[in-house]
Amino acid sequence: MRFCDNCIIPVGFPNYEFVSHNNQLLCNRCFDLMFVPIDKERLRANWENYLVELRKKEITETNKYHAILFYSGGRDSTASLYMLVKEFGLKILAFTLDNGMKGRSVLENIFNVTNYLGIDWYLHRHYLVDELNDMINKGVYPCGKICNVLQNNYYKSITKQFNIETLVTGYEIAPKNKGIIKKDGYTLVSLPALLNFGREKTMEICKYLPWKDFGYFDTESYMPGMTDCLAPCIVIEKKYKNQVMNFDNIQVGSIEYDLLPYIADRVRFGAADRNKILEVLTKPIKASDLAWSEYMSCVIK
């Protein structure tokens, strides 16, 4: 099987085209990025100017926070939280939306980090266990299909509930090279730690904090960006236990169709090592014993 020489998208992947360029075979996403790259310096300037001005906002009894961070508890949002608190000196409310598949280890990480940084944490439970488990049992990759929609629906309501005008997320790729978007009633700041810090510093920050990379995949089946929810690793292992992923004739709507572009983005923007990921994807993928234990605890609640 031939893959894009820059990311991990296989040749023949639905809705992707491939281009030969300078003796490389590139998917159209990687090829386009060569000529219209994300302007990291512009993004950093946007973030810094906005957050410096935000820090001037007076903190009062009725306006207790500069901003809300939608805090998933994963590595990226943890590094973003550190940046907001330690580098910009902002008073942050960490808001976590628990879909029912956040295991005990994830919630412990969130508690430990927010406690260490001395910030308030608001945990809101909106359980989707039945819906997510149904998708898992049907072999449907759940990420982005339910939780992202739910999360977007909460943006406006929580800013209004807490009387906070700025909501920050830790998206890996800031939209339209802006990073700051005015919405109806609030401002959405996409502050991806990976673009701002890079992979190595992001990992370094998390090691400094009381945040554990406990791993929902076994060490030989490391997968990037899956440190805050059980659903991805369980559905992947249920389909591929003792088998390798099939890259031939990938169908729209399959696990591969939803999973590979997500991982490719992280490879493309420096969040994951291409060779390591390809090595993992060509072997059986296994969820850790911890993942299975916490998954069963979530399901039987």
Image (cartoon, helix red, strand yellow):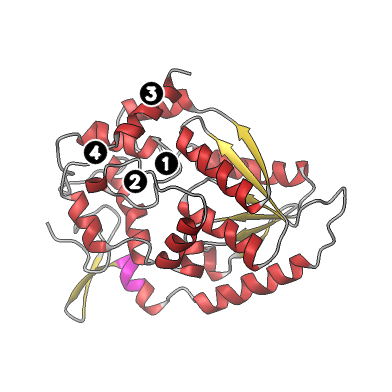
The residue where tag 4 is placed is 286
Q: Which mark is residue 296?
A: 3
Disc 1 + disc 2, Cβ < 8 Å: yes
Judge the density around disc 1: few (<14), some (14-19), many (≥20) Cα neighbours within 10 Å: some
Give the residue type that dot 4 points to: Lys
Return the residue nearer the eye: 160 or 25: 160
Residue 225, position as x, y percentages in the image? 40, 51
Q: Is residue 206 left or right of residue 141?
A: right
Disc 3 + disc 1, Cβ < 8 Å: no
The residue where tag 1 is placed is 143
Where disc 2 sits, the SS reads helix
- For marks 4 and 2 on the same chain, the one whose residue lies earlier in the sequence: 2
Q: Residue at x 50, y 29 (%)?
A: 100
Of badges 2 and 3, nearer the viewer stands 3
The residue where tag 2 is placed is 258
Give the residue type that dot 1 points to: Cys
Q: Which residues are magenta?
A: 28-32
Quarter of the image with the N terminus is bottom left
Return the residue nearer the eye: 252 or 290: 290
Give the residue type that dot 2 points to: Asp
Disc 4 + disc 1, Cβ < 8 Å: no
Residue 102 visible in the current orientation? no
Q: Residue at x 32, y 25 (%)?
A: 137
- For marks 1 and 2 on the same chain, the one whose residue lies earlier in the sequence: 1
Give the residue type that dot 3 points to: Met
Residue 123, position as x, y percentages in the image? 63, 36
- 131 relative to 203, above or below: above
Return the residue nearer the eye: 80 or 108: 108
Of badges 4 and 2, nearer the viewer stands 4
- 67 relative to 47, above or below: above
Judge the density around disc 3: few (<14), some (14-19), many (≥20) Cα neighbours within 10 Å: few
